[in-house]
Structures are given as C-alpha cells and as structure tokens.
Amino acid sequence: MLEKITELPERTKTKEALLVRGEGRDHGHFILGAEIEILKAEDNELTNGGGLVTQYIHVKEEAALKHLNIDSREWTQEHAPILIPPGKYRVIKQREYNPYSKAIRAVKD
C-alpha cells in the first residue's frame, strides 16, 4: 500500500525498485520512472496503526507501479500498471487480523 505523506524522514537511499516480492511465485511490484528517489525504512518501522513500513518514495515525475517477473522484468499481465502521481509516499506492507486464529499476518499477493 502506498500512503501519501508530507515529509520524508532521513533514511538511506537505495536503487532497488522492487517494493514488494510476491509470495510463492517469481514476481513482484516494482516502481519505475525517470525521477524517483527510494529510501529504505528502518528495521521493524511501524505506522501508528501497526503497518510495517518498508520504503519511502519521492516521485518527482509521474511513475508506474508494475507487476513484473523478478528475473526477466517482463510484465506478468496480472494487472495493468498503476500510475503514481508526483509526491512523497511511504510503502506499507499490509497486515490483517484473523479473529478465528487470533493472529496477525501479512496480506499476501
């Protein structure tokens, strides 16, 4: 999940465009564009609501979130690219609560 924010924290820059790796298959969600700054979150960095923050992104020109094969970087055709307007965002790995098992787990793609 991308959440728009007003300010970016001081974090280490990275060139890794893979935001989230899919479970069970060789695919992932990549952010691609000409003017993107990607920052790593700190280990176990959480939102106030308990979401796990994985990266921060400064999109300076419109970018695209694409579902690609990790090795070949070819489009998986599972869903169309999602256009991301300029702005500052944090990437949150969503979690969900299962009331039957009384456990919190990561939402799987």
Image (tube, rainbow, N blue to C red):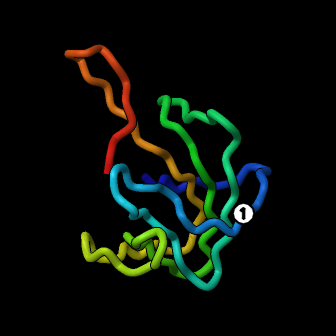
The crowding category of the residue bearing disc 1, from other C-alpha atoms within 10 Å (few below 14, some 14 to 19, many at least 20), is few
- The answer to which quarter of the image holds residue 106 is top left
Image vertical order of residue 15 relative to residue 109, above or below: below
Q: What residue lies at 32% left-to-right and 45% top-to-bottom?
A: 108
Give percent across and percent down for residue 87. Answer: 58, 67
Residue 52 image position (x, y, % from top left):
53, 38
In the image as oriented, which residue stretches furthest toward the left?
Answer: 100
Question: Would residue 33 be found to the left or right of residue 2 on screen?
Answer: right
Element carrying mark 1:
strand
Q: Write the residue at 34% across / 19% down.
A: 103
Q: In this view, does 53 lie to the left or right of 76?
A: right
Q: Provide residue 7's location: percent of width, then percent of height.
A: 68, 54
Q: In which quarter of the image is residue 60?
A: bottom right
Q: Of 71 and 38, which appears nearest the observer?
A: 71
Q: Circle 1 sits on which residue?
A: 14
Whether 41 is drawn above or below 19: the answer is above
| Residue 26 x, y percent position in the rendering | 39, 62
Residue at left offset 58%, top offset 33%: 46
Left or right of 52? Residue 24 is left
Q: How many marks do you count on the picture?
A: 1
Give the residue drawn at x 52%, y 56%: 4
Amino acid type indicated by mark 1: Thr
